[in-house]
Amino acid sequence: DLSGVWSPNRTGIPHLENRGVPVDPAALRQFDADVTPEQPPSFQPWAAEKNKAMTATEREVAKESVNCVPRGLPAIWLSNTYAIQFVQTPRLLVHLIEVLNNFRVIHTDGRPHPKNPDPLFHGNSSARWEGDTLVIDSVGFDERTFVTNSGTWFHSDQLRVIERISRPSKNYLVVQITVEDPKVL
């Protein structure tokens, strides 16, 4: 059961360092970055050029927070410093996000995605359980969202986000995010 109110761990979020948020050592990264380094995403040439050509003003204006629209997915995980709440039922997981009163309704009954999904800020999400891990597969994103809240990583209509959420203890969740976008990456 993922139900509960969850606060982001301050690890990797520098501006939380001085907010007094305690660090749970068990929630720290479980891999050695020197042994398995994470490589930055590799963009298609046209996408890299478009990103490079954006001015600082264009990047700032593109941010969801500037436009008062939802951050999108996975930006709600990557740049969210606010608490979230999960409400779980046998067929649904409701994801309430404190910032800008955002929410997601995730069907956990394994239903397929709609054939022509209406674009949503957090995508159209369908989930299934793999043991104790909830795997959320999301497609059909609103074009106004970015993968990160920096206004630098835009996406195409082929964006797919896979979230893997597990709860190894009562005290924390582990969230792993995979971003696929063959037109941009």
Image (spheres, rainbow, N blue to C red):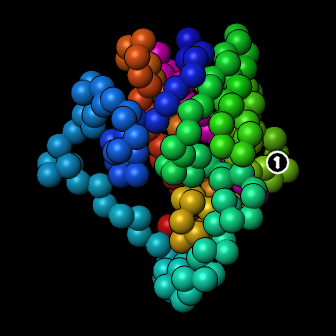
Give amino acid for label 1.
Answer: Pro
| Residue that mark 1 sits on | 117
96 versus 162 height, above or below: above
The part of the chain drawn in magenta is: 129-143
Vertical comparison of 140 with 41: above or below: above
Task: Please tell me how crowded label 1 is: few (under 14), some (14-19), or many (20+) other residues with Cα within 10 Å.
Answer: few
In the image, residue 18 lies in the stretch drawn in magenta? no
Residue 168: x and y, percent?
Answer: 38, 17
**Image check: 76 left or right of 21?**
right
Residue 161 x %, y %: 58, 47
**Residue closest to the eye, 20 or 88:** 20
Q: Is residue 10 visible?
A: yes
Image coordinates of residue 52 in percent, x first then y, are 49, 85
Relative to residue 35, is residue 129 drawn left or right? right
Whether residue 184 is visible: no
Q: In which quarter of the view is residue 37 placed?
A: bottom left
Q: Residue 62 vs residue 185: left or right?
A: right
- Picture residue at 72% right of the left edge, 51% below the top: 70
Q: Quadrant of residue 50?
A: bottom right
Image coordinates for residue 104, horizontal then vertical, percent:
72, 35
> Residue drawn 51% across and 51% down?
79
Tally of numbered tags: 1
In this view of the protein, which residue sits in the foreground, 74 or 69?
A: 69
Look at 41% across and 29% down and name the residue there.
Answer: 174
Mark 1: secondary structure = loop
| Rendered position, 112 above or below 160 | above
Taking the image as shown, residue 131 lies to the left or right of residue 29, namely right
Is residue 12 positioned above or below 98 on the image? below
Q: Find the residue positioned furthest to the left.
A: 34
